[in-house]
Image (cartoon, helix red, strand yellow):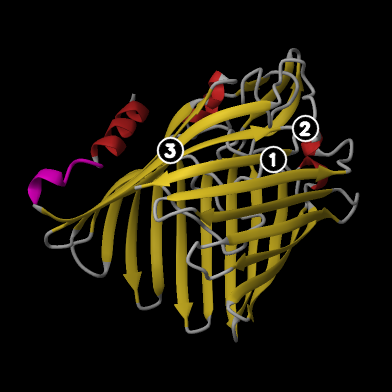
């Protein structure tokens, strides 16, 4: 019963402050995109399709009260997929109300969005929000997390404490969709009612940033095991301790995310991602090169598929009126030699229109690895977006 009450409370906090003061500043932005995603290879299941036309949109809004002590944020995402109903969904990625009576502390509640860590290829300590598995296997998109947070700003750093009343599991595509095993995955619903607690301490001093975190609750990463009718995803209770470090060296950055996880069955593992990036000026254009290495003690059982992997990538910006940008990266498995190649490019057609193209190619995936069921899910994607 109290879980249901916490859910209602989290949503109610979004609106609780609106009537008490006049809103002095409101910003609204969004986009709607028309595109398609094409998979050159047949899926592992006969029901899986190769061509997926989609329409998706994003809406972002922010409000600040006249005195500046009440803040509201909203981020809504929606997708319509005509080939797979399960991939057609709407997601409230963030919807929060924050009360900031002074400069030393504030309270925030609703649907939270909070990122931990500095690395890009594998944020091993990022545990507040669940990854949105329906969007893409890289884990960049996140689900909104109902909860409350309290922030205290001290001379020795900033302390944030979270109360997260229930857990959100991975969501897999339907029978026609991709990025899923070829058989059904039964989700463990019992873990959804288990609350979690988290705390993070941050300190920034000149060229150095550090974040220390602690989490107790249901793991955001499932253990996928064989079951009678296919697979079963279960979420163990864990204690997670993490550290994130970033150091500015000239124009470059050195980064490290480290984590130690201990579950109720006393299994424990250590993982980390370390690397850096360096911006380069190439005439009127900008190029940033980066490299990161991920280690996961679980080896091939790691749900991300990253256990001893090296990322090499680059981001390029033309700095022109059209805002042309491109990225390219290669994730290399140091044990098997398997690679994941990604590339994307975008360019404005006008002040309100932009086109994008993206590719995701799997090279020599190895049997026995967790992500082997994605071996036929290489794809190319194109889209055109209208901003407002």
Q: Which mark is residue 380?
A: 1
Could you say which is closer to the camera, residue 12 or residue 143? 143
Residues under labels 1 and 3: Cα distance? 19 Å
Spot occupied by residue 315 in the image (x, y as percentages of width and height): 64, 65
* Quadrant in the picture for the N terminus: top left
Q: Which structural element holds mark 1?
A: strand
**Contact, mark 1 vs mark 2 (Cβ under 8 Å):** yes
Q: What's the CA distance linking mark 1 and mark 2?
A: 8 Å
Q: In the image, residue 48 lies at what x, y percent?
A: 71, 20
Instruction: Name the one closer to the observer, 344 or 79.
Output: 344
Asked if one can make out residue 220 in the rendered structure from this viewpoint, the answer is no
Using the image, tell me which numbered label, if any, was put on residue 57.
3
Mark 3 Cα shell of 10 Å, populated few (<14), some (14-19), many (≥20): some
**Residue at the disc numbered 2:** 40
Q: Of marks 2 and 3, which one's residue comes earlier in the chain?
A: 2
**Is residue 17 covered in magenta?**
yes
Q: Main secondary structure of the magenta part?
A: loop
Which range of residues does the magenta coloring cover?
14-21
- Residue 349: image location, x then y, percent: 48, 53
Q: Position of residue 7 (x, y in %)?
A: 33, 32
Quarter of the view holding residue 226: top right
Residue 118, quarter of the rendered image: bottom right
- Could you tell me which residue is drawn at 50 percent across and 25 percent down? 88
Q: For the point 77% across and 15% down, which residue is it? A: 46
- Confirm whether residue 269 shows in the render: yes
Q: CA distance from mark 2 to mark 3?
A: 26 Å
On the rendered structure, is 345 left or right of 296?
left
The extreme front residue here reads: 350
Q: Earlier in the sequence, mark 1 or mark 3?
A: 3
Q: Residues within 10 Å of mark 2 (few under 14, many from 20)?
A: few
Crowding at dot 1, Cα within 10 Å, few <14 / some 14-19 / many 20+, comes out as: some
Name the element at disc 3.
Answer: strand
């Amino acid at each position: 019963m109290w879980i249901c009450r916490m859910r209602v409370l989290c949503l109610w906090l979004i609106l609780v402050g609106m009537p008490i003061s006049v809103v002095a500043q409101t910003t609204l932005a969004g986009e709607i995109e028309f595109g398609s995603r094409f998979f050159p290879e047949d899926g592992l299941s006969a029901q899986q399709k190769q061509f997926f036309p989609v329409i998706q949109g994003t809406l972002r809004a922010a409000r600040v009260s006249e005195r500046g002590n009440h803040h509201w944020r909203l981020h809504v995402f929606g997708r319509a997929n005509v080939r797979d109903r399960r991939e057609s969904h709407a997601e409230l990625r963030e919807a929060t109300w924050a009360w900031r009576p002074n400069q030393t502390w504030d309270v925030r509640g609703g649907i939270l969005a909070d990122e931990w860590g500095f690395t890009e290829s594998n944020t091993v300590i990022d545990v507040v929000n669940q990854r949105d598995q329906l969007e893409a296997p890289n884990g960049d998109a996140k689900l909104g997390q109902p909860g409350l947070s309290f922030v205290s700003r001290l001379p020795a750093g900033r302390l944030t404490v979270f109360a997260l009343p229930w857990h959100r599991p991975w969501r897999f595509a339907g029978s026609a969709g991709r990025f899923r095993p070829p058989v059904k995955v039964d989700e463990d619903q019992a873990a959804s009612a288990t609350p979690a607690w988290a705390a993070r301490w941050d300190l920034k001093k000149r060229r150095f940033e550090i974040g220390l975190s602690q989490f107790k609750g249901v793991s955001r990463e499932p253990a996928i095991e064989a079951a009678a009718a296919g697979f079963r995803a279960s979420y163990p209770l864990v204690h997670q301790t993490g550290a994130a470090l970033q150091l500015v060296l000239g124009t470059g950055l050195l980064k490290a995310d480290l984590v130690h996880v201990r579950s109720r069955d006393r299994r424990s593992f250590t993982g980390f991602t370390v690397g850096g990036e360096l911006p380069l000026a190439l005439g009127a254009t900008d190029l940033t090169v980066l490299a990161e290495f991920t280690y996961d003690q679980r080896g091939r059982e790691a749900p991300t598929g990253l256990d001893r992997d090296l990322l090499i990538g680059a981001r390029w910006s033309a700095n022109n009126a059209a805002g042309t940008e491109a990225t390219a990266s290669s994730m290399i498995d140091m044990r098997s030699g398997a690679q994941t190649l990604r590339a994307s490019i975008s360019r404005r057609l006008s002040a309100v229109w932009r086109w994008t193209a993206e590719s995701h190619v799997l090279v020599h995936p190895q049997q026995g690895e967790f992500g082997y069921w994605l071996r036929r899910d290489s794809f190319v994607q194109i889209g055109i977006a209208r901003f407002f």
